[in-house]
Image (cartoon, rainbow, N blue to C red):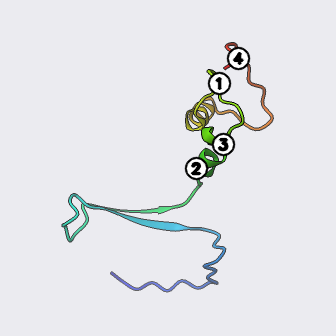
């Protein structure tokens, strides 16, 4: 493999683009990976919302209270965006 020199500024604290190298191994004892993936970050999830809307931290939990992770999955499947109107016929 050749060494390639790329000119430009490097900012490790606030990069414009992030790249990831992921190695997949068949077994933990293997020395060589089964597959190697190289990818560019195009988006991040919002796992922090599960903690923010944790059921144990809510004032009221009733029979219609839904687990926040399931509600986020449903909103993503429905492609709900901020400021959109959602009708819930079962008021759940």
Q: Which residue is mark 2?
A: 47
Pointer 2 with pointer 1, Cβ within 8 A: no
Q: Which residue is mark 1?
A: 62
Callout in the foreground (4, 3): 3
C-alpha gap between disc 1 and disc 3: 13 Å
Q: Is residue 7 above or below residue 46?
A: below
Q: Does label 2 or label 1 sit earlier along the sequence?
A: 2
Q: Does label 2 or label 4 sit earlier along the sequence?
A: 2
Say the numbered circle drawn on residue 91: 4
Q: Does label 4 or label 3 sit earlier along the sequence?
A: 3
Q: Residue at x 61, y 38 (%)?
A: 55
Q: Which residue is mark 3?
A: 57
* Residue 26 place in picture, x, y as percent: 22, 57
Circle 1 SS class = loop
Q: Does label 2 or label 3 sit earlier along the sequence?
A: 2
C-alpha gap between disc 4 and disc 3: 22 Å
Say the numbered circle drawn on residue 24: none
């Amino acid at each position: 493999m050749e060494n390639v020199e790329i000119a430009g500024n490097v900012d490790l604290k606030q990069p414009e683009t992030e790249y990831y190298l992921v190695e997949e191994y068949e077994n933990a004892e293997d020395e060589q990976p089964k597959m190697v993936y190289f990818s560019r970050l195009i988006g991040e999830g919002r796992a922090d919302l599960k903690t923010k809307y944790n059921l144990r931290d809510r004032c009221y939990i009733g029979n219609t209270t839904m687990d926040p992770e399931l509600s986020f999955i449903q909103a993503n499947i429905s492609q709900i965006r901020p400021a959109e109107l959602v009708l819930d016929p079962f008021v759940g």
